[in-house]
């Protein structure tokens, strides 16, 4: 689970409760403020991280099947869901069921409940079906893996032909991320910096 998504957790709890009780939200200024706080947190995340550029780099669109690894509270997941809707799917993984429950409520409240599938996984295994994904996104998460090389090698089995593994992280994790990808045999296709603090690297499976 990424650091920025953990910071959003308190807002998600309050916002999800507000969305879950519409009658109260209509008449309770405090409930409305909770929704405003949630929207404000999303806007802040979007401005600071430019997730639209991450989605562009991933090369996904309507009908794509995507995995969001360590999805946390879903601040980035919602952009993936919007990109692949209505016929695509986002499998949003995390190691914390409580956080995934909040993500599910958030996606339902935003109209993406049928697009996003929360999935509980272990800390060091992808937990994804073979040959099923157009893109697998790791946003601020790969540096937490005990063995990132083994994780990335396992994840390549989940890619469709031509599928992509996309790593987005803070610049100071770049060397570690790129070295792990190299050792896993991944092929770098593109790299960008949507904001000065973060990089986005797009890889494909090892060439045979």
Image (cartoon, helix red, strand yellow):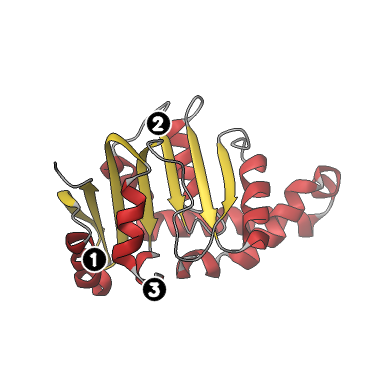
**Residue 61 visible in the displayed image:** yes
Q: Which residue is mark 2?
A: 64
Label 1–label 2 contact, CB within 8 A:
no
Q: Quadrant of the C terminus?
A: top left
Which x, y percent locates residue 27? 85, 48
Q: Earlier in the sequence, mark 3 or mark 2?
A: 2
For the question of whether residue 169 can be seen, the reply is no
Q: Is residue 72 above or below residue 54?
A: below
Q: Which residue is mark 3?
A: 146
- Mark 1 or mark 2: name the one nearer the start of the chain: 2
| CB-based contact (under 8 Å), mark 3 and mark 1 | no
Q: Residue furthest front?
A: 208
User: Count of labels shown?
Assistant: 3
Q: Is residue 110 left or right of residue 47?
A: right
Q: Residue at x 30, y 42 (%)?
A: 58
Q: Which residue is mark 1?
A: 180
């Amino acid at each position: 689970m990424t650091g920025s998504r953990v910071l959003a957790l308190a807002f998600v709890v309050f916002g999800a409760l507000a969305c879950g009780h519409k009658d109260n939200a209509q008449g309770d200024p405090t409930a409305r403020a909770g929704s405003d706080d949630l929207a404000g947190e999303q806007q802040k995340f979007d401005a600071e991280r430019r997730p639209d550029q991450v989605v562009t780099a991933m090369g996904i669109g309507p009908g794509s099947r995507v995995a969001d690894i360590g999805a946390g509270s879903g601040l980035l997941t919602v952009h993936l869901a919007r990109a692949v809707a209505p016929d695509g799917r986002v499998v949003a993984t995390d190691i914390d069921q409580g956080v995934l429950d909040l993500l599910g409520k958030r996606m339902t409240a935003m109209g993406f409940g049928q697009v996003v599938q929360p999935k509980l996984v272990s800390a060091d295994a992808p937990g994804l079906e073979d040959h099923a994904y157009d893109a697998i996104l790791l946003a601020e998460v790969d540096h937490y893996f005990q063995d990132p090389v083994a994780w990335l090698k396992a994840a390549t089995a989940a890619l469709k032909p031509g599928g992509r593994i996309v790593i987005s992280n803070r610049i100071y994790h770049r060397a570690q991320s790129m070295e792990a990808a190299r050792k896993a045999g991944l092929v770098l296709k593109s790299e960008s910096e949507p904001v000065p603090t973060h990089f986005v690297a797009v890889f494909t499976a090892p060439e045979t």
